[in-house]
Amino acid sequence: MRIAVLGGDGFVGWPAALHLSARGHEVVIVDSLVRRAIDGELDVQSLTPITSPKERRDAWREVTGRVIPLERIDLAEDYDELKGWLGRFRPDAVVHLAEQRAAPYSMKSARHKRYTVDNNVRATHNLLAAIVELGLDAHLVHLGTMGVYGYGTVGAPIPEGYLPVRVDLEDGGEAAQEILYPANPGSVYHMTKCLDQVLFAYYAKNDGLRISDLHQGIVWGTNTEETLKDPRLVNRFDYDGDYGTVLNRLLLQAAVGHPLTVHGTGGQTRAFIHIKDSVRCIELALLNPPKRGERVRIFNQMTETHRVRDLANMVHAMTGAPIENVTNPRNEAAENDLVVRNDQFLALGLEPTTLREGLLDEVIEVARRHKDRVDPRHIPCTSAWTDAIRRRMEEGGRPALRVVGG
Amino acid sequence: MRIAVLGGDGFVGWPAALHLSARGHEVVIVDSLVRRAIDGELDVQSLTPITSPKERRDAWREVTGRVIPLERIDLAEDYDELKGWLGRFRPDAVVHLAEQRAAPYSMKSARHKRYTVDNNVRATHNLLAAIVELGLDAHLVHLGTMGVYGYGTVGAPIPEGYLPVRVDLEDGGEAAQEILYPANPGSVYHMTKCLDQVLFAYYAKNDGLRISDLHQGIVWGTNTEETLKDPRLVNRFDYDGDYGTVLNRLLLQAAVGHPLTVHGTGGQTRAFIHIKDSVRCIELALLNPPKRGERVRIFNQMTETHRVRDLANMVHAMTGAPIENVTNPRNEAAENDLVVRNDQFLALGLEPTTLREGLLDEVIEVARRHKDRVDPRHIPCTSAWTDAIRRRMEEGGRPALRVVGG
């Protein structure tokens, strides 16, 4: 398959590109490299020493003999370049990971909110418009988020994208119907993935585009089979309060002797997936495209759910690191349940990589190896969802440690 | 009330600004004047000879003694100017009409699709971000569209924004809930109003913004009490295939001796509202804001529904103009029913202006008076929803006239 991986220099994009290249697909990365620029803006760096775009692709060629070209295009800004390149490459599939993907970053300021909305909506819509304008029949595989559902809006497990509902009719009867699950985003970033859903539904309906939307849980881990083949292929590992994901952050904190920071009571239940499964799911979606005229195919790309405080307690039990409950910067319920269906990927053969001590140890080991690269100032989450929360965080100061089992 | 009317130079914005100014509110128009520029792009002009922004505002001052300043700001491009001005004016309410509002224009080409999405989403989101950044407690009244509902997705009347549904639970029970009505837009333009809804729901939830969204039907008529006070106050009247609305177009066609163009069978049922009621509804919404923390208040701003072919037959009966059935440029069902609730505006005192011969005659009279300004090349709708439809329109050529009652 000829596959364009948009955002292929990023945390999920890079291992996905390698995974697909290793399986014999003709892969081209399209990336503006803005994620590396944001490291500069935030004055932070990946825990792992990622190499330059050229060095990592050279290394892949050295190790495997396979070539992955890079097209440096900003999807949101360079429509003509995007269209020109797509028209020449004519991919069978486009994996779209080219969005600003951090909720805390999206809430830092009006500028960050506006950047996230402008960038993500324009990138996605430019891509859709280009596919239609070119008459391409490429399968579009997009990385969504479990965050489009919020905590779920009803007391039933979260289905894969579509919710069967019944509506009362005037004559006393009722109508049954499947609807797109009601959007309930928890941040401006998550909101952009809800906007994407509306774009996808329209272009699938009006233009017959074939689209799969993968609502991913929180990714943890850093290595995949392919990134382990050479140190220069190492994947990025974000530990900072903006881009770091919760489980990786807890493991990093344990490794560097920082208290395990838990927002509020830690009663938030979240969906998780290991990076190895993330790239495998993308491959499975690519191998199983919808037909033309079919509605958007929506997958829940996650393997298990956990409460944040349970994860913190687990890491505490493994490492002895103390737990610190801090003011939650997010505007969300303190406690929520979350039951999620993921039958489709299981039926397609996904064998979930679940939280095991071995894999958790591997992450801690990576964190220990590179601990000299950690800037402790970047560990706390400082991006507040509202001004009122910001004031509460500032007034609260640094709460006393609550050491579990200490 | 201090009211900012964004898009206040446009078809609904201008009479709305006058209506609110006449009732003693302190009104400022914010407009980029892009709508006038688009007339140039399309090489078409308003049927009515609208005066310059300065001349029409000078006339209003002469006639009424009231001043309506104009701030020339592009909401989508000039965030800092928008924020700066809002921070100085500190309006009690913002009426947001500053979006590209023609479905056919939005479907003309990839450029037009992209412009419509970029402009509308950025304008709306910039406004929301600015209100939050400034800590303004302004009531935001936005003009949505009945098109967010499509034809309705269930066999029940379309409620005002929120649909009560029931969901089966795993234990055999069921959960009842009100959800935002499932979006089903019929064009890229309509899609942007669905995107707006997601933005509004989020900012109402996270930031407590007070927002009313008015899902308007197709506007007909051109004069209001205020625009009739002086010829220089005349409202714009679009008759062209991109910006003209269906009933006004049929009346114009009858006035200039053009066949009444009906797309497909004319079996499409649409919601309608007269321009006088449109501005009255905006005022009613302004007088009845939601409370802080309340969900977005959604109104259906329409007074009646009609099938397009019934309107054509009515205009034919009034004028003898022949009816021409042409290939439908839109990708939509040939026939649909539409039952819509509009209880809220009725309860607030709206007295609907319905289709009466007198008002229809008034529109024909306006059209006859300015018929020398009509360019017949611009009467047909040429913007096709898909390439396949475009080919069908080109191959079909100009179908034979089907004269009803001839």
Image: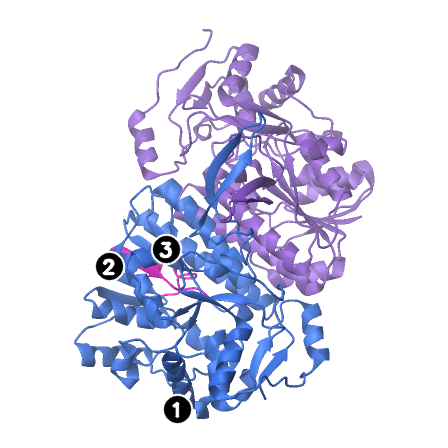
Chain colours: A purple, B blue
Q: Which quarter of the picture shows residue B25?
A: bottom left
Identify the residue position indicated by label 3 in the image.
B343
Identify the residue position indicated by label 2 in the image.
B89
Which sits in the foreground, B293 or A326?
Answer: B293
Number of numbered discs overlaid on the protein picture: 3
Sequence-wise first label, 1 or 3: 3
Q: Is residue A394 visible?
A: yes
Q: Residue furthest left?
A: B65
Residue B99 % position (x, y):
44, 64
Residue A330 horizontal side relative to residue B1, left or right? right
Q: Chain of mark 3?
A: B
The three-letter code of the residue at mark 3 reads Asp
The three-letter code of the residue at mark 2 reads Phe
The secondary structure type at the circle numbered 3 is helix
Q: Which residues are magenta?
A: B70-99
Residue B96 % position (x, y):
36, 61
Residue B174 % position (x, y):
53, 31
Q: Which quarter of the picture shows residue A214?
A: top right
Gap in Å between the C-alphas at discs 1 and 3? 37 Å
The answer to whether residue B73 is above or below residue B163 is below
Does the magenta-highlighted stretch encompass residue A146? no
Q: Quadrant of the C terminus of chain B?
A: bottom right
Q: Which mark is residue B380?
A: none
Residue at 33% over, 83% down: B51
Identify the residue position indicated by label 1 in the image.
B369
Gap in Å between the C-alphas at discs 2 and 1? 40 Å
